[in-house]
Image (spheres, rainbow, N blue to C red):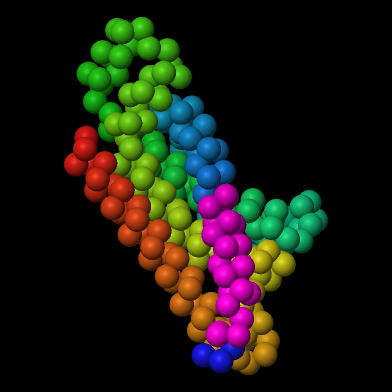
Amino acid sequence: MKWTLGHIPEILLATAQHLWLSGVSVVIGFVVAAGIAVYCAHRPRAYAVALVLTNLLFVLPSLALFAFLIPFLGLGQKPVIVGLSSYSLVILLRNMVTGMNAVPQDAMEAARGLGFRPKDLWLRVELPLSAPFVISGLRIASVTVIGIATIGAFIDGGGLGTIILTGLDQNRAEKIIVGCVLISTLALLFDKALQLAEQLFVRWR
């Protein structure tokens, strides 16, 4: 515990960086996935193509994807954020489309009868009714991204992965343990918080 107690500011900074990388990536992934979902939800062929492409991104090894992005975005947080956003796409897209397709057609027809435009239809009918699916997708995507963000340390992306990486380089078990425990804690906190939000929304609805 000697290293930990003497480096609290460094640990807090790495934790904040990890939260920043993960949070921004999930938000970007959510916005992109929402746009794709709105277009593809009622177009099966387009959805099939989108699923294939986003699945291909998801199965790429994270370090390989980050390395591929370096010539275009350089070292640092930019390629990490782009890569992490890409990994969240397939999770968010699948849950969004599943949720939108689960919306009762009676509700959709009633909204159209009231003169709702496509944008209003999505914002005021489809999105609220599909929210449990969306929150579930956010939950899975957040935990996934928090874990993969660790690899960003290899390309100077910062975060808690930096502590683990330096611990490996210096053969300092304490650094490795601290980094792993904090990453696991963040993932569990986000998982439980979003699980609670999902349960509350289902009860409210």
Q: Position of residue 196 (x, y in %)?
A: 28, 53
Instruction: Using the rendered image of the protein, determine whether residue 46 is visible from the camera's viewpoint.
Output: no
Q: Is residue 71 toward the left or the right of residue 100 in the image? A: right
Q: Is residue 95 above or below residue 67?
A: above
| The magenta stretch spans residue 82 | no
Q: Is residue 150 above or below residue 125?
A: below
Residue range of the region highlighted in magenta in the rendering: 4-25
Magenta span: chief secondary structure:
helix
Q: Choose top left, top right, bottom left or bottom right for residue 17.
A: bottom right
Quarter occupied by residue 130: top left
Q: In which quadrant is the C terminus drawn?
A: top left
Q: Position of residue 134 (x, y in %)?
A: 37, 42
* Residue lying furthest left: 203
Residue at point 55%, 85% (across, down)? 5
Q: Is residue 115 visible?
A: yes
Q: Nearer the viewer, residue 153 or 88?
A: 153
Instruction: Identify the residue at image location x=31%, y=48%.
Output: 197
Residue visible at 57% across and 70% down in the picture: 12
Q: How many marks?
A: 0
Q: Is residue 19 magenta?
A: yes
In screen coordinates, is 44 left or right of 83?
A: left
Q: What residue is shown at x 48% (from left), y 35% (from top)?
A: 34
Task: Name the residue nearer the viewer: 56 or 76.
Answer: 76
